[in-house]
Amino acid sequence: MTDISVIIPTLKPRDEVECIDHLESNSFSDYEVCLQSEPTATSARNAGIERAESDKLVFLDDDSRPREVGTETAGGV
């Protein structure tokens, strides 16, 4: 099981989601990305919760730029 599930509501194709590039550039690597395309951000987040493998959830927007400190801190919670 992964340490963190990162849930990203989006209507964009995966290759256009900026947030993923920023996550991949961090040294923290024990996470999964759950991209969810639903009619509303709320329903996408709820679908992501259902799909997530980890008990630790991080919610980001598709244009977020997470810092390394943030993902490492979330992993240690």
Image (tube, grey):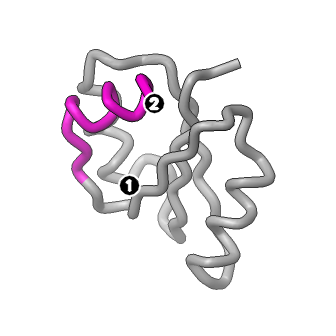
Query: Main SS of the magenta segment?
Result: helix
CB under 8 Å between callouts 1 and 2?
no
Identified at 57% across, 31% down, the residue is: 32
Q: Which residues are magenta?
A: 65-77
Residue 28 on image: x %, y %: 35, 19
Q: CA distance from mark 1 to mark 2?
A: 30 Å
Residue type beneath disc 1 = Glu
Q: Quadrant of the N terminus?
A: top right
Q: Is residue 63 above or below residue 66?
A: below
Q: On the picture, is 6 further left or further right than 54?
A: left
Residue, disc 1: 16
- The reply to whether the magenta stretch includes residue 6 is no
User: In the shown orientation, is residue 31 left or right of residue 73?
Assistant: right
- Whichever of callouts 1 and 2 sits on the residue coming sooner in the sequence is 1
Q: Position of residue 50 (x, y in %)?
A: 80, 53
Task: Report the residue marked by disc 2.
Answer: 77
Hey, which quadrant is residue 61 in on the image?
bottom left
Q: Nearer the viewer, residue 55 or 66?
A: 55
Query: Residue 69 lies in magenta, yes or no?
Result: yes
Kind of residue indicated by mark 2: Val
Residue 29: percent from the left, percent from the top? 42, 17
Residue displayed at 38% across by 55% down: 16
Q: Which residue is at a point 55% across and 51% down the rendered structure image?
A: 7
Residue at the extreme bottom of the image, as rendered: 39
Q: Nearer the viewer, residue 33 or 3?
A: 3
